[in-house]
Image (cartoon, grey):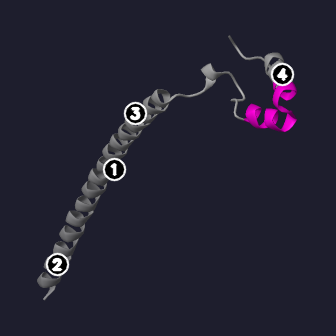
């Protein structure tokens, strides 16, 4: 049976007549604002935690793969420039030696 606002109000009125307004308010505050079926259970939270862990692990793997790709590209560019600059320096030294 779904709890409606009407049924909550009837319950409150009955409690108010039985135990007084202050105690009825205290007791009603302990009821969920929605039906019990709408509340998350421990099992729901455990499932959500497991799914979140899996999502984070997949994201971590994608990030690591991207990082490795970028580092490999950066290393290739660096090595290429180093070889070119060493070749230019060696050519300049050889040309300078021929002048003497």
Tag 3 near tag 1, CB within 8 Å: no
Residue shown at the point (40%, 33%) measured from the top left: 50
Q: Disc 4 versus disc 3: distance between alpha carbons?
A: 43 Å
Mark 4 against mark 3, which lies toward the viewer? Answer: 4
Q: Earlier in the sequence, mark 2 or mark 1?
A: 1
Q: Is residue 82 magenta?
A: no
What residue would you read off at disc 2?
95
What residue would you read off at disc 3?
50
Q: Secondary structure at mark 1?
A: helix
What residue would you read off at disc 1?
67
Number of other residues with Cα within 10 Å of mark 4, as a class: few under 14, some 14 to 19, many 20 or more: some
Mark 3 against mark 1, which lies toward the viewer? Answer: 3
Please state if 7 lies on the left or on the right of 83 as rendered: right
Q: Secondary structure at mark 4?
A: helix
Mark 2 against mark 1, which lies toward the viewer? Answer: 1
- In the foreground, 70 or 41: 41
Q: Earlier in the sequence, mark 4 or mark 3?
A: 4
Number of other residues with Cα within 10 Å of mark 3, as a class: few under 14, some 14 to 19, many 20 or more: few
């Amino acid at each position: 049976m779904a709890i409606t606002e009407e049924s909550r109000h009837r319950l409150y009125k009955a409690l108010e007549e039985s135990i007084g307004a202050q105690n009825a308010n205290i007791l009603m505050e302990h009821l969920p604002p929605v039906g019990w079926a709408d509340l998350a259970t421990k099992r729901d939270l455990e499932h959500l935690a497991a799914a979140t862990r899996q999502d984070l692990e997949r994201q971590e793997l994608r990030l690591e793969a991207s990082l490795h790709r970028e580092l490999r590209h950066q290393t290739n560019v660096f090595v290429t420039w180093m070889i070119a600059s060493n070749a230019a320096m060696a050519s300049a030294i050889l040309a300078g030696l021929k002048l003497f």
